[in-house]
């Protein structure tokens, strides 16, 4: 049993294979957060929390005679507001009389079999794991707000999920202005904070800073999880490395506005609060109404950052993404975007498919420009019917011809968006998110549909499914190409406008749910101008997301590495594109582009007409290699071998099979040196006593040698030189 309650000590235990999470109901009935970290057995860890009468940290009324007791110092599981805890609050609830206070006390709990689910929101699935749910009820009887804290444990993966149901149990209206998904207090933390910031074409750049006595905020108010701040962050020991040290991960399973706040307080304790962003957020709770927060996926590892990533990788592959994709080989694709942009017709697309087929490519994805009057990126979004002038015979003709080659056919959509120059906008200007007294903010000359409206969702479902029904379409690239602004819905009254951003996400998820339920054979690839919605929420509906609009392999090294801290390579859309690269102008070899793209879902995105015969041969070989290593890459354990904290001029990573009987070592040199120090890495995850042969040579090494002594590459020169080495256990 991974969840238990010790009634004598009033202690809750959540236990996974390697971690313990403890909470305690204290004498004031406040639910204290006691411990989260490596397994500690049965010890009540509350001895770690020592309290002192600290000036200006006041005392609850019932404890006024004992000044050492203050909510401002107490480690809490879900902090209230306005009652003397001056650190980050988890909730802001405003009562009808304007009072802004909430003081939660324990009321009861239940341990139930199975995993809870959250209405309208994606959440971790139980699938093949055994899971239980702990539901702890806290309430403030004065304002009449109850919170049910929900917990589940993925035992083997060292993952704990949390969510909260906030209910108005009084008889008066309550307005929520903040509703976090989780809060956690860790005492004695000398931590570094790692977050993944970025921009369009440069997503998830890892940044690591020492935590000081201030408040760090990581978040997005762009109506999307964003290129700019991923909803995933890590706290790790100041001296933690890729393979050593304590690391905590905080991942929000949400694709809209989010916020994670981290505060080191006066006593050196660290509080992390994560959830939906409270910027431009409010939610009206009438009597008996409930609000469901998105889920937070927590994990802990004392095996460094690689250990933490491994926990998330397994949980995302097996419990976030639809399990059917776990053992399903996904096709190597060619996307026409960087091959043709908007300049294509039926003949060009079919010819691209024919050439691709000869090289071993298995699917063609027709990108932007096939619908309405979409001749460039100024018109057409929303008119989801095929442009028969550009594509005579429609999509059916293209899909049939592609299918006849033995290939699959996929199609691009951008459902949440609308252009002014469309039939849809002329008929339904009121469907746009728009401040009634203001011109809308434009981006890529497009506006955003009001996804909170059921009629908008129904329109999109009907017209997109008509397209899906019209031809054999087995893949959809679901794009989202701008930040949201003018968050105002025509359908809602003034006092509900603070709800629109979240209702927008609920509408989007509802639409995605409808498509995944009703079109189980259509695989969705998420996309938002590349990786602007690379989050666990989208991964619930689509097993892969286009990682970045920057396809330059050298830029991709950093983007994919940053992404790998939280997300497995099986989710990272990654293609070989042209050289010089269209975004950066950089020239690279096919081999380097191939090695980088292979550490993802793999495909091509370039004009095959412009390739030499030698290059086409290289593509064939790359595809064969990819097939050979497919399961090792997609399901193997991934290790970053070059530490961000070390100055290296190369980037190396490794995949190890579950049986530890083979490993694929990859290296790309990003800055060639004359007379160099040799690139050298220590491999991970092998069997110490086994002997491994470097395939294609007669060289053999023990696992211990490769892990302790490492592997030296010797001098590597040329244009971003690279190697991909396969080590196989000798049986
Ligand atoms: C976004 C995507 C690209 C491509 C274009 C089409 O930028 O990330 O891959 O689909 O839209 O407009």
Image (spheres, rainbow, N blue to C red):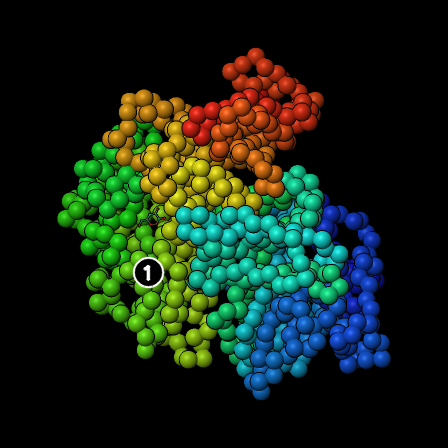
Which of 595/399 is in front? 595
| x and y, in percent, of residue 715 in the image | 53, 22
| x and y, in percent, of residue 555 in the image | 44, 41
Left or right for 491, reference 196: left
* Ligand 1 closer than 8 Å to label 1 CB: no
Q: Quadrant of residue 679?
A: top right
Residue 325 in the image: above or below residue 254: above
Which of 1/370 is in front? 370
Which of 245/110 is in front? 245
Tell which residue pokes out farthest to the front in this image.
675
Tell which residue pokes out farthest to the right in this image.
65
Q: Quadrant of residue 354?
A: top left
| x and y, in percent, of residue 21 in the image | 72, 54
Residue 351 in the image: above or below residue 302: above
Q: Is there any visible trace of residue 280 in the rendered image?
A: yes
Q: Residue at x 64, y 26 (%)?
A: 710
Q: Which residue is mark 1?
A: 443
Q: Is there any visible trace of residue 133 in the rendered image?
A: no
Q: Residue at x 23, y 38 (%)?
A: 349
């Amino acid at each position: 049993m991974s969840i238990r309650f010790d009634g004598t000590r009033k202690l809750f235990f959540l236990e996974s294979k390697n971690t313990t999470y403890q909470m305690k109901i204290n004498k004031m009935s406040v639910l204290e957060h006691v411990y989260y970290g490596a397994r500690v057995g049965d010890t009540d860890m509350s001895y770690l929390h020592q309290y002192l009468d600290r000036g200006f940290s006041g005392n609850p009324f019932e404890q006024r005679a004992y000044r050492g007791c203050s909510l401002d110092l107490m480690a809490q599981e879900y902090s209230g507001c306005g009652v003397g805890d001056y650190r980050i609050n988890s909730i802001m609830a405003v009562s009808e009389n304007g009072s802004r206070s909430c003081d939660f006390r324990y009321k009861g709990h239940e341990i139930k079999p199975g995993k809870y689910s959250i209405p309208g929101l994606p959440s971790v699935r139980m699938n093949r794991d055994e899971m239980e749910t702990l539901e702890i009820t806290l309430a403030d009887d004065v304002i009449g707000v109850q919170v049910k804290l929900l917990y589940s444990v993925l035992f083997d993966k060292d993952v704990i999920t949390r969510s909260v149901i906030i209910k108005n149990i009084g008889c008066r209206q309550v307005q929520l202005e903040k509703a976090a998904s989780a809060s956690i207090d860790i005492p004695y933390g000398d931590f570094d904070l790692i977050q993944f910031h970025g921009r369009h074409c440069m997503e998830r750049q890892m940044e690591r800073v020492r935590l000081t006595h201030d408040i760090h905020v990581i978040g997005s108010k762009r109506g999307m999880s964003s290129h700019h701040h991923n909803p995933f962050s890590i706290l790790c020991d100041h001296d933690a490395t890729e393979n050593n040290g304590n690391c905590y991960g905080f991942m929000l399973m949400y694709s809209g506005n989010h916020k994670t706040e981290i505060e080191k307080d006066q006593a050196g304790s660290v509080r992390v609060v994560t959830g939906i962003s409270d910027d431009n957020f409010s939610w009206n709770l009438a009597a008996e109404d409930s609000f469901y927060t998105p889920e937070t996926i927590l994990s802990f590892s004392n095996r460094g950052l690689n250990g933490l990533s491994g926990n998330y990788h397994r949980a995302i592959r097996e419990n976030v993404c639809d399990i059917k994709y776990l053992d399903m080989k996904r096709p190597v694709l060619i996307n026409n975007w960087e091959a043709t942009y908007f300049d294509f017709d039926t003949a060009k697309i079919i010819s691209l498919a024919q050439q691709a087929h000869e090289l071993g490519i298995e699917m063609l994805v027709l990108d932007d420009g096939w619908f309405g009057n979409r001749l460039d990126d100024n018109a057409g979004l929303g008119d989801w019917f095929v442009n028969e002038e550009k594509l005579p015979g429609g999509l059916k003709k293209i899909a049939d011809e592609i299918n006849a080659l033995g290939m699959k056919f996929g199609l691009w959509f951008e459902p949440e968006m609308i252009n002014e120059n469309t039939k849809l906008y002329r008929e339904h200007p009121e469907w746009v998110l728009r401040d009634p007294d203001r011109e809308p903010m434009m981006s890529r000359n497009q506006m955003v549909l009001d996804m909170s409206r059921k009629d908008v969702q129904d329109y999109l479902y009907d017209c997109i499914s008509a397209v899906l029904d019209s031809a054999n379409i087995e893949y959809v690239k679901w794009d989202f190409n701008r930040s949201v602004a003018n968050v105002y819905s025509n359908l809602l009254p003034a006092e509900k406008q603070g709800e629109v951003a979240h209702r927008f996400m609920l509408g989007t998820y509802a639409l995605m749910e409808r498509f995944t339920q009703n079109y189980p054979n259509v695989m969705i690839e998420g996309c938002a101008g590349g990786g602007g919605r690379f989050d666990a929420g989208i991964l619930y509906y689509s097993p892969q997301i286009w990682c970045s609009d920057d396809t330059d392999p050298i830029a991709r090294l950093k983007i994919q590495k940053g992404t790998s801290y939280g997300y497995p390579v099986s989710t990272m859309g990654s293609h070989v594109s042209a050289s010089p690269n269209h975004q950066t102008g950089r020239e690279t070899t096919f081999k380097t582009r191939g090695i980088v793209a292979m550490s993802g879902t793999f495909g091509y995105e370039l004009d095959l007409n412009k390739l030499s015969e030698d290059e086409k041969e290289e593509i064939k070989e790359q595809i064969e290699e990819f097939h050979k290593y497919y399961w090792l890459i997609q399901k193997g354990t991934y290790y970053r071998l070059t530490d961000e904290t070390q100055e290296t001029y190369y980037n190396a990573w490794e995949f190890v099979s579950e049986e530890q009987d083979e490993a694929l070592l990859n290296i790309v040199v990003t800055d060639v040196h004359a007379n160099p120090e040799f690139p050298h890495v220590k491999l991970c995850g092998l069997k110490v006593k086994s002997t491994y042969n470097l395939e294609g040579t007669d060289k053999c090494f023990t696992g211990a040698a490769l892990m302790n002594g490492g592997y030296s590459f010797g001098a590597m020169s040329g244009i971003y030189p690279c190697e991909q080495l396969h080590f196989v256990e000798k049986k």
